[in-house]
Image (tube, helix red, strand yellow):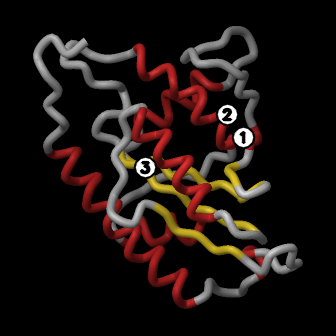
Amino acid sequence: MQQLFGELAKQGATGKIVRAADFNIKPGVKSDEGKGDDWPDLRRQLLAADILVIGAPIWLGQPSSIAKRVMERMDAFLDEKDERGRMPSYGKVVIAAIVGNEDGAHHTAAEILSGLIEVGFTVPSGGSTYWVGEAMGSKEYKEFKRPPKIVAKWTQMLASNTAHLARLLKAQQYPGIKGGR
């Protein structure tokens, strides 16, 4: 995530990394699931941003349950359309950063990005960056002193595409349709 945010910064995008695992995100499909739910504050931060990066490990060939919980909570956007039929996420760009010691990076990215397209996010060309080690191997991405060359180059390209798309959407939001609800 730090490498990706570094590349986004080179493109003029700023932001911060928030670990969903550090918060009590209750299960559900509403924007606020009641007392003790940390999602409403996280949701405000997410909607204040132009770019959302979902970072997730590969567990059993799919996104972590925490990544799925975050996506589940954005299901509320389906019922939160404005007068032109646009969900709160319209005009926001989403990308995925995936790591793991097994195959499944494409599947994991597809689950995340497809789900977030359904709730109004836009995905730039490329959509995700990833690294997978040897299946059942012991090396983890965080152990590299620098990223593998191909990963670094692709992350740079993804950051460029992402920042470009975010600027375009910021300048000209999706129009929606009259009576779009």
Q: CA distance from mark 2 to mark 1?
A: 5 Å
Q: Quadrant of the N terminus?
A: bottom right
In the rendered view, does 180 fall on the left or right side of 119?
Answer: left
Mark identifier at residue 11: none
Q: Which residue is mark 1?
A: 66
Q: Residues within 10 Å of mark 3 (few under 14, many from 20)?
A: many
Q: CA distance from mark 3 to mark 1?
A: 17 Å
Q: Which residue is mark 3?
A: 94
Helix, strand or loop at mark 1: helix
* Up/down of 124 relative to 69, above or below: below
Q: Position of residue 89 (x, y in %)?
A: 37, 33
Residue kind at label 1, given as amino acid type: Ile
Q: Are marks 3 and 2 in contact (CB under 8 Å)?
A: no
Q: Which residue is mark 2?
A: 69
Q: Quadrant of residue 117?
A: top left
The residue closer to the viewer here, 107 or 57, is 107
Q: Are marks 3 and 1 in contact (CB under 8 Å)?
A: no
Residue at position x 66%, y 54% from top? 56
Residue at position x 73%, y 75% from top? 141
Please tell me which of labels 3 and 2 falls first in the chain: 2
